[in-house]
Image (cartoon, rainbow, N blue to C red):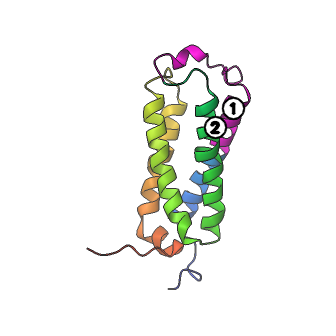
Amino acid sequence: MHPQTQRRTFAVWALLALLLIQGLGGTAGGLSLSLEPDGSIMHMPVSFLDGSPFTDYLIPGLILLLVLGIAPLVALVALWLRRTWAWYLAFAIGCGLVIFELVEVQFIPYSWLQPFFGTIGVLIALLSLLPSVRRYAGVVLARA
């Protein structure tokens, strides 16, 4: 079946939903940290960053905003429109989110948000790999 006529499967809908959740969460968190780099909006003292390469939350906030907030929303729209590159972006976002959370737990005290968004990252990456999602996006992986 041609990708343009294939229906959205449960896996595609789940991926779209997770990209929306991540996009909204990343945008809200990224804006909060970027607008007030002292962490006051999110009640995160700058002392959490001791031992990290950052003196405040501006750079982590911008990364969160752009890479894990806006990019998932772009991937969501592009995947809805069946742009092949959206599949690659979604997979990269899933992997990037897992890496972001693994680094974050090294510096920020435990919060339920860390495993929550870490799990979302794993699910985004795994859902992206499903054959039904790849077919929907029109992605053909080379055979060895």
Instruction: Pick out the residue farthest to the left.
Output: 144
In this rendering, does residue 123 appear at all? yes
Mark 2 element type: helix
42 in magenta: yes
Horizontal and vertical percent position of residue 129: 41, 62
In this rendering, does residue 9 appear at all? no
Residue annotated with mark 2: 62
Residue annotated with mark 1: 34
17 in magenta: no
Q: In the image, is residue 67 above or below residue 31?
A: below
Q: Is residue 84 left or right of residue 95?
A: right
Q: Is residue 41 left or right of residue 96?
A: right
Whichever of callouts 1 and 2 sits on the residue coming sooner in the sequence is: 1
Instruction: Pick out the residue farthest to the top.
Output: 47
* Kind of residue at badge 2: Leu
* Residues at marks 1 and 2, CA–CA distance in whole angstroms: 6 Å
Mark 1 element type: helix
Horizontal and vertical percent position of residue 16: 59, 59
Horizontal and vertical percent position of residue 89: 53, 59
The residue shown at (59%, 71%) is: 83
Instruction: Pick out the residue farthest to the right.
Output: 35
* Kind of residue at badge 1: Ser
Q: Quadrant of the C terminus?
A: bottom left
The residue lying toward the viewer, choosing from 103 and 120, is: 103
Identify the magenta region. 24-52
Q: In the image, is residue 81 above or below residue 72?
A: below
| Crowd rating for badge 2 (residues with CA inside 10 Å; few <14, some 14–19, many 20+) | many
The residue lying toward the viewer, choosing from 94 and 60, is: 60
Circle 1/circle 2 CB separation < 8 Å: yes
Horizontal and vertical percent position of residue 100: 48, 38
